[in-house]
């Protein structure tokens, strides 16, 4: 699983409205953008901001020097502390949007910080091993990032979500990445995660629906219509 598998994001603009963030996610990750359409307005805005935060954090894995990535992660760690505090937030468009959409959701600050920490673990490996190391614990750290992101998205849609449901969400994210990376026993992991996800409440499914648009076992990309149909069917039946 390459550390450069996730595409870099657009640099943040000086100022942006909520519609600009929505457009930005549509340009950079249409599958997740489509899935957010199934959430209510507040949930949708939280998901969009969280996914764009994830893109910013993904950029740290593309730096030429791991330490530069770690510096950027620390910047976001401090910024998220401001987002969760009572004082002013740094003048950064996404930071301000995160503060807006989480204004009454202080419970999201710790999971966002956990996502930053998961990226930091990957960069620690880069510092000590001189870059990406296929397999083993390093691959597990990549899976952990996807799990953290999925848990965060689930909490954004359902405050105080039951822990088993959050575990199922994390399992789906990790299994989907393992499948994409063709890791050993990935298919069995995916099948088990799919079964557990059936019990996840429907309100949390907009954070899962982008997985319905993944390429098939033969590596074929679904057509735009097929992608939308798969998401609709998954939302209706809660089955991926």
Image (cartoon, helix red, strand yellow):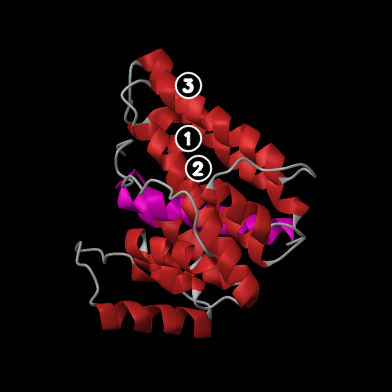
In the picture, which quadrant includes the C terminus?
Answer: bottom left
Residue that numbered label 2 is attached to? 145
Is 166 a magenta residue? Answer: yes
Residue that numbered label 1 is attached to? 141
Q: Residues within 10 Å of mark 2 (few under 14, many from 20)?
A: many
Q: Are marks 2 and 1 in contact (CB under 8 Å)?
A: yes
Q: Earlier in the sequence, mark 3 or mark 1?
A: 3
Name the secondary structure under disc 3.
helix
Is 191 a magenta residue? Answer: no
In the rendering, which numbered label is found on residue 87?
none
**CA separation, marks 3 and 2?**
14 Å
Left or right position of 228 against 118: left
Question: Residue 228: x and y, percent?
Answer: 36, 80
Stretch in magenta: 162-187
Q: Which of the two residues, 99 or 185, is positioned nearer the viewer here?
A: 99
Q: Residues within 10 Å of mark 1 (few under 14, many from 20)?
A: some
Task: Determine whether 129 is above or below 238 in the image.
Answer: above
Residue that numbered label 3 is attached to? 124
Question: Residue 214: x and y, percent?
Answer: 33, 65
């Amino acid at each position: 699983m390459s550390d450069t598998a996730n595409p870099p994001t657009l640099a943040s603009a000086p100022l942006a409205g909520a519609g600009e963030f929505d457009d930005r996610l549509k340009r950079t990750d249409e599958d997740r953008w489509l899935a957010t359409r199934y959430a209510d307005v507040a949930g949708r805005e939280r998901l969009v901001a969280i996914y764009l935060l994830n893109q910013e954090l993904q950029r740290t894995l593309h730096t030429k020097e791991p330490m530069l990535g770690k510096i950027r992660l620390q910047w976001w760690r401090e910024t998220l502390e401001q987002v969760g505090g009572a004082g002013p937030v740094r003048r950064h468009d996404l930071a301000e949007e995160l503060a807006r959409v989480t204004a009454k959701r202080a419970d999201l600050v710790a999971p966002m910080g956990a996502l930053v920490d998961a990226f930091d673990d990957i960069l620690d490996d880069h510092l000590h091993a001189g870059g990406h190391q296929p397999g083993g614990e390093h691959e597990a750290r990549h899976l952990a990032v996807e799990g953290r992101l999925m848990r965060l998205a689930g909490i954004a849609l359902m405050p105080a979500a039951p822990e088993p449901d959050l575990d199922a969400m994390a399992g789906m994210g990790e299994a989907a990445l393992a499948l994409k990376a063709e890791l050993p026993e990935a298919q069995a992991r995916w099948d088990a995660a799919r079964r557990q996800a059936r019990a996840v409440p429907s309100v949390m499914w907009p954070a899962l629906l982008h997985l319905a648009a993944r390429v098939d076992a033969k590596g074929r990309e679904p057509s735009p219509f097929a992608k939308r149909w798969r998401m609709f069917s998954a939302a209706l039946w809660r089955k991926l």
